[in-house]
Amino acid sequence: MVAVLVIWVVGFLLAVNLVTFAAFAVDKRAAARDNQRISEDTLLKLAVLGGSPGAKLAQARLRHKTVKQPFGRRLNLIIGAQVLLLAAGVILYLSPGARAVIFSQFPVLLE
């Protein structure tokens, strides 16, 4: 059961990162051709969904959205939040004591 969940999560993350990288590439090309662009809001939503590695890779490889500071700060904030959530998840997973303390406050989660 857990292995299947891990496979789905990894597959989802691979897909969302490929889509995010592709969206940055499409937006870069549209910017060069003065065509309709992909909104920054959409690009940031893709990062929130788990595509932040793809977004950072696209920024570096395509040199796209690197100067626009409001966008860059928001992307970095998303990445920081994701790192904190991941760290919290790892701590909860590795520390039975932390799990017991947190879940004792929310008994419905133990059912």
Image: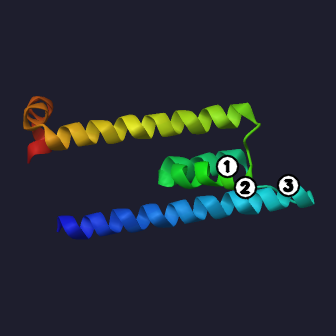
The residue under label 1 is: 59
Which x, y percent locates residue 81? Answer: 44, 35
Name the residue: 78% across, 56% down.
Answer: 28
The residue under label 3 is: 31
Which x, y percent locates residue 101? Answer: 10, 29
Disc 3 to disc 1, C-alpha distance: 14 Å
Name the residue: 52% across, 38% down.
Answer: 78
Name the residue: 62% across, 60% down.
Answer: 21
The residue under label 2 is: 62
At label 2, which amino acid type do we have? Leu
| Drawn side of residue 85 relative to residue 28, left or right | left
Tell me whether circle 3 and circle 1 mark residues in contact (CB < 8 Å). no
Question: Looking at this view, is 40 or 64 the one in front?
Answer: 64
Name the residue: 40% across, 38% down.
Answer: 83
Q: Nearer the viewer, mark 3 or mark 1?
A: 1
> Regarding mark 1 in the picture, which secondary structure is present there?
helix
| Drawn side of residue 21 relative to residue 84, left or right | right
> Regarding mark 2 in the picture, which secondary structure is present there?
helix
At label 3, which amino acid type do we have? Ala
Mark 1 neighbour density, 10 Å: few (under 14) some (14–19) many (20 or more):
some
Which x, y percent locates residue 51? Answer: 52, 54
> Is 17 drawn above or below residue 85 in the view shown?
below
At label 1, which amino acid type do we have? Gln
Tell me whether circle 1 and circle 2 mark residues in contact (CB < 8 Å). yes
Q: Earlier in the sequence, mark 2 or mark 3?
A: 3
Q: Nearer the viewer, mark 2 or mark 3?
A: 2
Image quarter of the N terminus: bottom left
Mark 3 neighbour density, 10 Å: few (under 14) some (14–19) many (20 or more):
some
Disc 2 to disc 3, C-alpha distance: 12 Å
